[in-house]
Amino acid sequence: MTTENRSGLLFSLRRAVFTFGLAFFVILSDMLVIHLGGVTTLHGLIEQTIILGLGLYFAYTGIAIFGTEIRF
């Protein structure tokens, strides 16, 4: 997936869907299981998903712009 996202446009829809989906999953997991973030309402879930999703999106876009490969 990283190769496809790196070769796409600067503002890729696939990149946005991936990062916001990941952010939603992380915040929802925290809300239902871990309880570290203090999110208890739907409004808080949406707010934290937007904040974390934008952060992940801009970080992933920065990696795509500067051409750094992610190797695991």
Image (cartoon, rainbow, N blue to C red):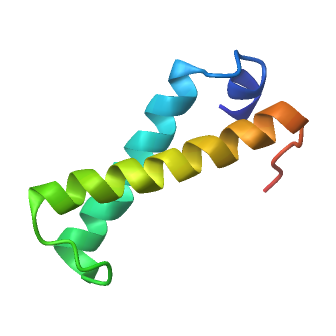
As drawn, which residue projects farthest toward the left?
A: 41
Rendered view: 37 above or below 69: below
Q: Residue at x 29, y 72 (%)?
A: 30
Q: Quadrant of the C terminus?
A: bottom right
Query: How many numbered marks appear?
Result: 0
Q: Position of residue 41 (x, y in %)?
A: 10, 64
Q: Residue at x 56, y 50 (%)?
A: 56
Q: Position of residue 11 (x, y in %)?
A: 62, 22
Side of 48 where 23 appears, left or right:
right
The quadrant holding residue 38 is: bottom left
Q: In front here: 61 or 68? A: 61
The quadrant holding residue 26 is: bottom left
Side of 72 where 33 appears, left or right:
left
Q: In front here: 12 or 69? A: 12
Q: Residue at x 11, y 56 (%)?
A: 42
Side of 25 where 64 appears, left or right:
right
Q: In front here: 5 or 71? A: 5
Q: In front here: 23 or 55? A: 55
Q: Position of residue 19 (x, y in %)?
A: 50, 42
Q: Residue at x 25, y 60 (%)?
A: 28
Side of 46 where 7 appears, left or right:
right
Rendered view: 67 above or below 37: above
The quadrant holding residue 52 is: bottom left
Q: Quadrant of the N terminus?
A: top right
